[in-house]
Image (cartoon, rainbow, N blue to C red):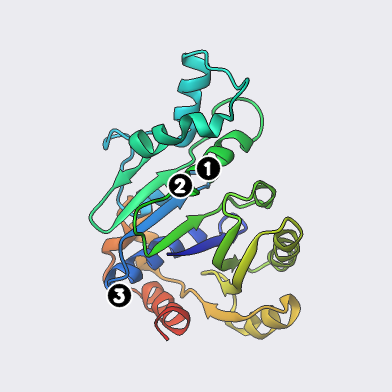
Amino acid sequence: MKTFVTMGRGGAGKTSFVALMTKFLIASAKTPLLLVDADPDQNLAEMTGIDIQSEGKNTIAELLSETFISRGGTTVGIAPSARIENTIWERGLYEGEYFDFLSVGTKWIEGCYCLPDAALKKALGTITRNYQFILIDSPGGLEHLNRKIASSVDMIFDIMGPSSKSFQHVKRAHRIIREVGITFDQFYVIGGYAFPDELGERAATETGLPYLGKIANDDMVAEYVLSGRSLINIPDTSLAYQSVTKILDRIIND
C-alpha cells in the first residue's frame, strides 16, 4: 500500500489532478484505491462521480457533530478519535467498484479542524483493507501539515500556480513537512493548468525539488468540472489526462 498526498495553493488544480490520477490508476489496474478528501471545499467527490449524501454516507465532520453535539458526547477520559473510529468506517466510507472514499467535510463547529483531522488520522491508522494506493487531497493552506493526517507517505505532489506565492508555498511546505516529522520517499513539483511551460526549469532550481512537468490546460476538463461530470469518465483524448498519464508513467509504471 502506497500513500500519495497532493497539495498546493487553492485554484492550482490539485483536486482535478487527484481525480485524473484516479482515472490513470484504474486504467492501469492498480486498484482498489482509497480516496481521502481532506479539503473542506469537498470537490473531490463530485470530480470522481460520487454523491455522498445520496449514497447515505456522512463526512467525518458530520459524524463528529452528531456524536459530540446532538448526542451530548464528551471528550473526557477517552480520545474522541478512538470513540468514533468504527463509526467512520461504517457510516463514512463510500465503497465503490474501483475505489473507496472518505471525506473530512466542512467545519462542524467554531474553531479549527484539529478534531476531524485527528479522527481521520486514527481511522487511517486502522486500515485493514488491501488498498494498493491511498490518495489524499489536502487543503490549500499549510496549517493541516502540523496535524499530520498521514505521518508517513510515499509521494507528495505540490501543484504550482503561476505566482511567486506558489514558489514560496512549495518551499514552506517542504520545510514544515520535515520539521513536524512527516516522513516521505519523494517530494515532486508539478505545474498546474495555468503554470507557464517556460517556468519549469526555474521551479526545479528555486525549490530544489524534482519538477515532473505540467498539467495541460484543457477546455474539456473545464467543461466537465463546470457541468459537475466525473473526470473518471473523461475521454482518454483529454489533453490534461494525457499530460497526467505522461507524468505518472515516469514514477509509477517505471
Q: Which amino acid does label 2 sit on?
A: Thr
To which quarter of the image does residue 181 belong?
bottom right
Q: Position of residue 185 (x, y in %)?
A: 59, 72
Which of discs 2 and 3 lies nearer the camera? The answer is 2
Q: Which of 1 and 92 is in front in this view?
A: 1
Q: Residue visible at 62% across and 22% down?
A: 77
The earlier-in-sequence mark between 1 and 3 is 3
Quarter containing the N terminus: bottom left
Q: Position of residue 247 (x, y in %)?
A: 46, 79
Residue 158 at least partly seen: yes
The earlier-in-sequence mark between 2 and 3 is 3
To which quarter of the image does residue 233 belong?
bottom left
Q: Do the residues labelled 1 and 3 touch (CB within 8 Å)?
A: no
Q: Which amino acid does label 3 sit on?
A: Ser
According to the picture, the residue beneath numbered tag 2 turns out to be 126
According to the picture, the residue beneath numbered tag 3 turns out to be 28
Q: Position of residue 133 (x, y in %)?
A: 41, 63
Q: Are marks 2 and 1 in contact (CB under 8 Å)?
A: yes
Q: What residue type is labelled 1?
A: Lys
Q: Is residue 225 above or below residue 221?
A: above
Q: Position of residue 18 (x, y in %)?
A: 44, 62
To which quarter of the image does residue 182 belong?
bottom right
Q: Nearer the viewer, residue 239 or 94?
A: 94
According to the picture, the residue beneath numbered tag 1 turns out to be 122
Q: Residue visible at 50% across and 55% down?
A: 137
Can you name the residue that lies furthest to the front here?
77
Question: Dot 3, crowdedness within 10 Å: few (<14), some or many (≥20)?
Answer: few
